[in-house]
Amino acid sequence: MQKTKAKTLAGFLELEPRKQIVFDNMKEKIKSVFELNGLSPMDTPILEYSEVLLAKAGGETEKQIYRFTKGENDICMRFDLTVPFAKYSAKFENQLIFPFKRYQIGKVFRGERAQKGRLREFFQCDMDIIDEGELSICADAECVSVLSQVFETLDYFIKIRISNRKLLGGMLDFFCLKEQTTEILNILDKQDKIGTEKTLEELLKITDKAKEILQLTAVNTVEKLEKVKINNTEFNQGVAEIKQLFEILKILKPKNEVVLDLKVIRGLDYYTGTIFEANLLGLGEPISVSAGGRYDNLAENYSNKKLAGVGVSIGLSRLFDILDKNNLLQYKTNTKSQVTIIPLGNTTNFCFDISKTLKENKINCDVLYFDKSFKSKLNYANRKKVPYIIVVGEEEIKNKTFGLKDMETGFVVEDKLENLIKVLRNKNE
């Protein structure tokens, strides 16, 4: 029989155990930061009715969504975690306690061309804060603070770049360019890639106010922003929100760098106020690994209730892939076992009894019960890079004393099992 070639679709990650362990540890650290900040866990289905998921989609977003039919159902795979959250908020609006702070960690799917830093299936780690009616700018500051805490916990440095949609929106309204907003923002979004001169050239094809627009994007402090004279209500609201946000951040004191950068545009059209993007530092060109912002009416496509919110999304799979390809991750082990128990002679049943006792004490372990030589079993433990082994022979059982060997240092502690358990539990703390 002809064998099928074992292959995986481009843009989909499959990790060997040593890498999966590191990935899962990163995910757990992010989860712990979310929970430390009082966020409630939630989840949404990977599959949604197309009419639900596409309620606000359009343009490139809709082109990248995986869509299919099953029977009479028109179904989409979730593109992000925010739109399903909007549906969730509308569905449970009478049960949720507002302000509602949530986190969700899950896979999303995008049918775009797989390339460096862009996957088709990837984990996102989202946090959102929503409230009925109005939502305090404190929530925006909290999102920025939590984002910084996440990367502090992961032990990587980021720069968080903050802007506000109302600033450029208000300026374009003041210049009577509201109808050209999308076109202008698309050009400004490429400014870091194409440079200021090329950006100016592209803007001049649309408006003679190109220089004024670029001058605004060059503003990099709140003090300078307050000196910009634009007689427009939306613009002035944006200035006030930015000022208040940075005042709160001075109190929260995030350890990662936070800057005002009006070149941050963000492509998704549901952002209405604060927007921010986090760039991973130390790899030459800054690499975007997280983004988020304010949306004034999260559930407008599903409910008459106004739910204002702000959220942040961390691209965990993208972050991991970047760190992995730059050799910035340490893969210390191929197993979650802390101890491997190796039987000598006819002691397998006793080894299972030891493993039962270890597991009752929350110590991960396994028994090498397969019928191979001691050398093969030791080689197996070495290849798995298990931290400790216990070798159990007739003599050990007779004396009720066992040797706990540190596989990294070679040091052996010989003692009764209950005392070895204390040693292992201390290692876990």
Image (tube, helix red, strand yellow):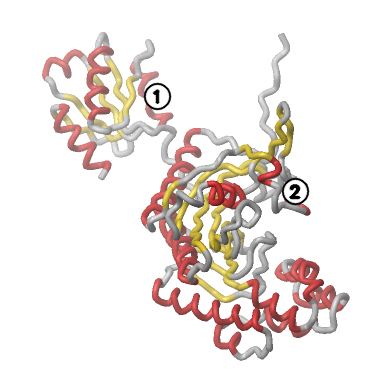
- For the residues labelled 1 and 2, the Cα–Cα distance comes to 52 Å
48 left or right, relative to 178: left
CB contact under 8 Å: marks 1 and 2: no
- For residue 312, above or below residue 264: above
Q: Quadrant of the N terminus?
A: top right
Task: Check residue 422 in the rendering and tell me which mark sits there, or answer none.
Answer: none
- For residue 393, above or below residue 333: above
Residue toward you, 132 or 280: 132
For residue 270, say whether it is visible. Answer: yes
Query: For the residue marked with disc 2, what is the amino acid?
Result: Glu
Quadrant of the image occupied by residue 33 = bottom left
Q: Position of residue 408 (x, y in %)?
A: 33, 38
Q: Position of residue 423 (x, y in %)?
A: 20, 37
- For residue 24, above or below residue 236: above
Mark 1, residue position = 379
Characterize the local packing of mark 1: few (<14), some (14-19) or many (20 or more) Cα atoms within 10 angstroms.
few
Direction left: furthest residue: 399
198 left or right, relative to 221: right
Label 1: element kind:
helix
Of tags 1 and 2, the one toward the viewer is 2
Residue toward you, 285 or 150: 150
Mark 2, residue position = 62
Q: Indicate which disc, 1 or 2, sits on the residue closer to the N terminus.
A: 2
- For residue 270, above or below residue 212: above
At 27% from the left and 17% from the top, the residue drawn is 352
At 54% from the left and 74% from the top, the residue drawn is 259
Characterize the local packing of mark 2: few (<14), some (14-19) or many (20 or more) Cα atoms within 10 angstroms.
some
Residue toward you, 82 or 196: 82
Q: Where is residue 285 in the image (x, y as percent from the top left)?
A: 63, 63
Query: For the residue marked with disc 1, what is the amino acid?
Result: Asn
